[in-house]
Image: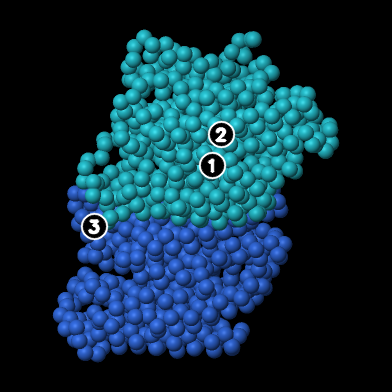
Chain colours: A cyan, B blue
Amino acid sequence: MSSADLVALLPLIVLGATSVVVMLAISLRRSHALTAGLSLAGLAVAFWSLWPAAGVVPLQVTPLLIVDRFALYYFGLIIAATVAVVLMGYGYFERHDVRREEFYVLILVAALGSAVLVASNHFVSFFLGLEILSVTLYALSAYLADREIALEAGMKYLVLAAASAAFLLFGMALVYAQTGTMEFPAIARDLVSGGAAHIWILAGVAFMVTGFGFKLAVVPFHLWTPDVYQGAPAPVTAFIASVSKGAMFAILLRFFYQSGSRDLHATLLIFAIIAIASMFTGNLLALFQNNVKRILAYSSVAHLGYLLVAFEAGGAMGAAAGTFYLTAYMVTTLGAFGVIAALSSSERDAEDIDDYRGLFWRRPVLATVFTAMLFSLAGIPLTAGFLGKFYTIAAGANASVWVLLFVLVLTSVIGLFYYLRLVVALFATEDIPTDAEQPLPAVPATGGLTLAVLAFVLIWMGVYPHVILNVIHAATSIFA
Amino acid sequence: MILVWLIVLPLVAGIIAGLVARRSQLAARWISLLAMVAGFAIIVRLWVENYGHISILTQQQWLAQIDVPWIAGFGIHFHLAMDGMSMVLLALTFLLGIASVMISWREIHDGVGFFHFNLLWVIAGIVGVFLAMDLFLFYFTWELMLIPMYFLIAIWGHERRVYASVKFMLFTQLSGLLMLLSILTLYFAHHAATGVYTFDYTSLIGTPLAPHTALLVMLGYFVAFTVKLPMFPFHTWLPDAHTEAPTAGSVVLAGLLLKTGAYGLLRFVLPLFPHAVHQFAPIATGLAIAGILYGALLAYGQTDLKRLVAYTSVSHMGFVLLGIFIGTPLAIEGAFITIIAHGISTSAMFMLVGMVQERTHTREMSRLGGLWQTIPRLSGAGMFFVLASVGLPGLGDFVGEFLVLLGTYRSSPLLAALATIGVLFSTFYGLKFIARAFHGSNTNQWKLADLSAREIALVGSMMVILLWLGLYPQPVLNTFAPTAQRYEQVVNGPTVAFRR
């Protein structure tokens, strides 16, 4: 392994080393602040290491990992999102009387798994990254083990994730059996030279779609989402909603683009059906929820449906639109769960819609941030979500996928309805619950800072996306 | 740069007003008022300065413009430009902005800061809509102005405010997204034809489209603008939104938001899709007639004063749609005058109903009556504006509708005859309004305060403007003339009139 290889892998190495260091530090001295501080320092170094790594890319390190601009962009996204989760988690767990420190080890390992995922172009690294991510998420979902609902969430996630991983593995095996290779580009060569795709490849891809679909939580693999979102602690939900899905979308792009399976007619058809079903199901089911976490869970099903529209559009524009949409969605969803985390107490998370009634008149800044996040989810101008939706629709119009676009338009109007329901609650002047007179928990400084930064990024991406668009175009140019 | 200031002024004033309201509500009101007055002064000054050569401007000559790249990757520019049409509409915007702040002076007590923040931001959004010459920027401001409007209805509205505000948002969002699809289709069609990615208005004019595509793309815009207008059968959000909104919200809705729909038709639909407009004109004019009659009929059936005024808007905006799609110069000029006159007369009616409600706490006709005996000045003003709305010669609305009818008669006597029936209906609802609310005996023994000095100034200046528009509309017509002449070419010879 050359020094260039090591430099390219530096972000992964730093992430891995940080989790080990944090674990050792916990065994020496249990201190919440110290643990969180060490994790942040490690993440900062990992983020910094993107620049030296950018000097040597693109680089295939071993047959397993490819470090290119696309991977680096997603590394940055994963690390930044993890920083946000750590910061909001610090304030959240300060209020809880549990062993808090292990949370950071798990989060760091999960970030490592996600990073491996986005850099893999080989079935083995793909599966390794996925399992590293999944196993830590089982533990993280059930982290507040004194809550029954958290245990349920952890169990549900464990069983379903294990089953879907089995499907994924079987799909990989079928593709391998037919093509004799596990490297994505090599699969593409076989697909091209072989003419019509063999039935085993089609079956394999179909099985793999199950694995992808589960992690992305798209219909019909979405059933775990509301329960896990509700049961897991708010910072963990934020991580699942942003980093885990983001990394999965990145590998989705990479696998289907680079292995040539995206060009299969059947793949496009399957994903079109999944996208339409997700947009409708997510938005319609969210209408009937009174729990904010569940609303956001169903909303995420719908948003992954929108993302698949960008995937369906294809080409460099589709990949760029998807990546931009995903970035915007990560910022937004982190912000939304950041607000939930900031308002949560040790007994329960602030997840009932009534917890938010009239919030604007008591906590104007927090309510404004939440409103901005909701508007971004709804795709209202000045926010990142608006440009994300614009870009996705533009990619779709360019590729003339009109059916998907009309479904997108129709369902986002349905979606607007439940986002507005939350906004109405935030600004309500009557029917404020009787315990509203009690002072709300003070927003922890770390959480407040995170929210401020996220809100800034949200507006910045929505008003002046020039800089980030350039970065994304460079990152997704590998799909041109 | 002056155009940027026109947008920045209300934005910044809105933030300041929102912040200072915690210390002093009065300061927030004054800051908002001053910002609106300043905006109005800027426009009036521009108008006076440019009046001499305004009527000979051609397509490429804007009175003022600014064009800087914004999102280079998409060819999106921050392009604002103003011609005569925009200028008159901006004058209306700031005028009604002043009126909205003043009418809220005593009506709004809760959340004063946030109220003025929203009010000024919706004004800023509307200014942006009237100035944006980049289709992306236009869509951006088009969507942006809805959010503060939504808050104005949802927070400070009446009993069914949540229902009304959500309905308003859903209607406008759905139609807006359809327009976005159309904008993007045009964008990619232009790229396919020229190899250039641009959202620029003047560049996109003349983009070759297959007739079938052009019709579909045009419909996307048409739906977005006619939902806002509103055209029958897309009008159902309007009575709810108008009725439930606070007075200032109704004024902005009726006076300005509806006008953005008419503006969009004039600015974008006609020049961008001359063929498709020609093809679609029979349907559009038919719907316009339906709106005129249906709106007037329903207005007659209402017992809630605000709802009555709301339905009259459906009827009057039918005239605007008719004038635009008939497309003769007279008809288009008439449509434009109607836009301005209706903006003023209907806003004034909403303000008067608001004043009545503030005093009596009801808008039900059955609970009113005989108001003339206790508040003669308010009732007199009410009669003035009702007569204006009905189309009394000498007042602004008459000129507009008369020109539309005249223009329509030349191309289709039947349509003109039907529309005239609408004018006849309007007399019924107008007289009903006056008779039930102001005349009769004062059975409820109302003893109320008549118009205050602030209210007299407000209502009086609106009367003066309506009289001016009714007696001497030539300055407005001159300012609008270059725009109208271009449309004439579109409809009569939809060939190359709009190519550069």
Classed neighbour count for the residue bearing mark 3: other residues with Cα under 10 Å, few (<14), some (14–19), many (≥20): few
Q: Where in the figure is residue B297, as x and y percent of width and height?
A: 45, 83
Subunit that carries the residue with mark 1: A
What kind of residue is marked 1? Leu
User: Residue sitting at 36 percent across and 9 percent down?
Assistant: A28
Of helix, strand and loop, which one carries label 1? loop
> Which mark is nearer the camera, 2 or 3?
2
Q: Kindly identify which residue carries mark 2.
A: A160
Q: What element carries label 2?
A: helix
Q: Could you tell me how far apart the alpha carbons at marks 1 and 3 are, in whole angstroms?
A: 44 Å
Identify the residue position indicated by label 1 in the image: A223
- Amino acid type indicated by mark 2: Leu
How far across and how far down the image is residue A476, in percent? 62, 33
Quadrant (top left, top right, bottom left, bottom right) of the C terminus of chain B: bottom right
Front residue (pair B108, A217): A217
Which element carries disc 3, helix, strand or loop?
A: loop
Q: Which residue is drawn at 51% across and 85% down?
A: B419
x, y (%) of residue B159?
31, 66
Q: Which chain carries label 2?
A: A
Q: Which chain carries label 3?
A: B
Q: Which of the labelled discs sits on residue B110, or is there none?
A: 3
Location of residue A467 with respect to B427 vertically, above or below: above
Q: Nearer the viewer, residue B220 or B193?
A: B220
